[in-house]
Image (cartoon, helix red, strand yellow):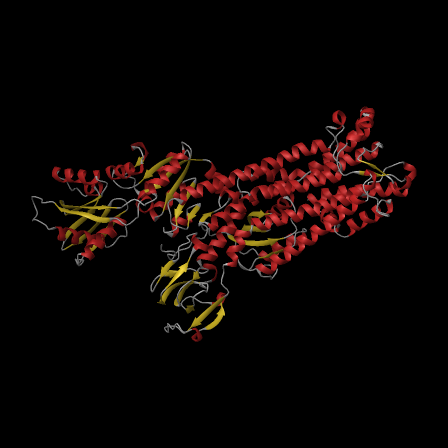
Amino acid sequence: MQLIPEKSIASAPSESASETFTLDVSGMKCAGCVRTVENTLKSEAGVKNAIVNLVTEVAVVECAPGIDSAVLAEKLTQAGFPSQSRQSDTAAPDGLTPAERQQQETRQQTRRALIAISLVVLSATGHLHQFGWLSIPGLSNIWFHWGLATLALLFPGRSILVDGWRGLRRNAPNMNTLVGLGTVTAYTASLIALLFPRLGWECFFDEPVMLVGFILLGRSLEQGARSRATAALQSLFDLQPTIARLIPADSPTLAPNAAAEIPASQVKVGEWLQVLPGEKIPVDGEVIAGQTTVNESMLTGEAVPVLKQSGELVAAGTLNLSGAIVIRATRTGKDTTLAQIINLVETAQTRKAPIQGVADTVAGYFTYGVMTIATLTFSFWYFIGSRVWAEQIQQLGHHAIGASHALMHSGGMAGMGELPTSPLLLSLKLAIAVLVIACPCALGLATPTAILVGSGIGAERGLLIRGGDVLEKVHQLKTIVFDKTGTLTMGQPLVTDCLPVTADSSADISADNLLQLAATVESGTQHPLAIAIQQQAQQQELPLLQADQFQTEPGLGVAATIDQNRVIVGNAQWLDRAGVAIPQAAQTQAETLTAAGKSLVYVAVNRDLIGLIAAQDALRPDAKATVDRLKSMGLRVMLLTGDQQTAAQAAAKQLGLSEQAVLANVRPDEKAKTIAQLQQQGTVGMVGDGINDAPALAQADVGIALYSGTDVAMESAGIVLMRDRLSDVVESIRLSRATFNKIQQNLFWAFIYNLLGIPIAAGLLLPSLGIALSPATAGAFMAFSSVSVVTNSLLLRSRFR
């Protein structure tokens, strides 16, 4: 497989009047934070759109030319989200290498987890004596629990309180605001009970301790899961070479001591580089000297090494296996294939699925709604509930679940698992539980984590999916339309027949003369049939004739003047337009050839038909299996081609497609209209590779382009198949469907969790069952919800091993 034609696989360019840049944003904790960052950016003059990713902590901003990214970063920093403009797609904003950053994150996760476990263990151990299990002097004392709660809020919980207060102050409350309100309220009420025992209130210092512990533990587990979700993208970053061996231009020496080592980022186009066995190829280039095998699996997913010799192209990041080579740099820095793949994957992970809009809308009002519900919960239970169900609460209090331990002042003893007898404390605990069980974080993680994992799996397998919007459209696909030439077929037709036709007004012409005339006229075009005719003429050593006044009509044919005669080469429509009649005998020959699945070219001189040239393009080996698998997935498969109906039907027959599934004689400028007509019946995907497919790829709901195709085709597509393998159409659809299913599952559980959890925390089950969630237990459930969403996304990998 030829890996790298000279083309770009970057995302389709935005409008000329727009610029796009990336900001690294920290301090985001939930979907509410994402909403705040997006709104902050969009409110700035000149900003057209902003998309923020909670997991990767980046903001992609589209704005008018001339907007300073540093100014926008400063605005976000002032709003409480420390940010900076990313100077390059591969540079780390903190100056650390990927390995160093990974080690730092691992240390932070470990430290956070140890602190969280210590808080939970110390708080719980202080109550073990109430079960008759263990009594440790000092740990059951109320003053110990006060000290532990104070230390927990001042140190590990300080960042939660500070960030929550900042969010509240800037009118953008977030998850930390809810947790902070809950912990501070629990601590304050317990402190008042401790300092003023005559009030008869219970102390529950264990609640803020447990809350901080569970929140930190949940975030540690969540961060670990996030790291695993970003592993695929990180592995792409790790592929980037750092060192290149520079040698003098025009001196293709393979001697190791003849090269000077320089940073790969400093290589310039045109420079000559030496690559030794076992080294990564530093830039995209052309082999000048030497021969080797190259492992390209990191880019294409193909495990079999590829032979590379003089004149062939190699890609940055691929591994030189067997021999020393000299390459000439053709693309460097951000222009290399690897850099563009990384950019495409990063962009894909930022683009949201439309379904995420529901979660974004909810996130914008979520924290306000939760604080309102908490206030109503307190008011209801304090003024109404504690009086209406006072007897039931007293009788069923011992059934209360959770980690709430009401420390009593008498002898430092604690009533374990009992509902508070004070209406004020009961109302307060339920209100706190509402605050901490609500989880905007799960809503914010639902979509990006699934897209992150799905796009990472795709990158590893050579399936580049441009974003969540593409995933959602793939999930809705009803019809898949294939271009024929170069997509379903090998794209390399060979001339099989060259049949002269004797006309009354012309002398007999030989097959060689017929082929020579056709090759001369076709020399001005790159259509697959034209290339086949030219190659056949070269093989027969037939020189091209002098010609001028070339005329090309896409989808019809070409014409040129040779020796003052107008030579016309093309299909029957082209001849009819030129006023050339096709004799009955020629029509019979043409029908026989097209019935055999061959593509036909007519050749005429002036107004007389002089011959027929037939060529046949073999189907790709995996074409039939691909079509069968797509049909088994419930998709309607169709064939779209500019070939004649009989040739298209012959190919369709080999593929197991019905006559109704064939759209033949469709000119390039009509393909997009044909796709638009099919879209009236449902969502349509288009698979193609050529320039003439670009309008149809853009028109289709989902465009799928083979990497061997042209720049414009791939820029118009939503999915690019790097391995240039037709069966990957099936794999890309499978992966897209599975990823979107994960998005739906994550959003479902995130919404259900909050819809069920908040009412239960508010005391819905207390009157009838005596069940009430303590604040600490509510906090544990909240932490679990975020971890479960990320973990569910990671389960995608088990399906694609």
Q: Which residue lies furthest to the bottom in this view?
A: 257
> Observer-nearest residue: 601 or 419?
419
- Please, is residue 772 above or below residue 94 in the view? above
> Which of these two is toward me, 398 or 623?
398
Q: Is residue 716 left or right of residue 510?
A: right
The image quadrant where one finds the N terminus is bottom left
Q: Position of residue 519 (x, y in %)?
A: 20, 53
Q: Looking at the picture, how far across and down is residue 731, in whole percent? A: 43, 43
In the rendered image, the residue lying farthest to the right is 198
State whether residue 721 is above or below residue 318. Answer: above
Residue 605 appears left or right of 393: left
The quadrant holding residue 627 is: top left
- Residue 318: tell me if it is visible: yes
Give percent across and percent down for residue 626: 37, 41
* Residue 397 in the image: above or below residue 141: above
Number of labelled discs? 0
Whether 193 is drawn above or below 541: the answer is: above
**Does residue 672 appear anywhere in the picture?**
no
Residue at 48% over, 71% down: 261
- Front in this rendered view, residue 703 or 207: 207
What is the x, y in percent for residue 763?
74, 30
Locate residue 16 relative to residue 60 in the image: left or right: left
Going 12% across and 37% down the picture, which residue do you hit? 584
Q: Which residue lies furthest to the front in this view?
A: 133
Q: Is residue 453 left or right of residue 364?
A: left
Instruction: Identify which residue is drawn at 67% across, 42% down.
Output: 783
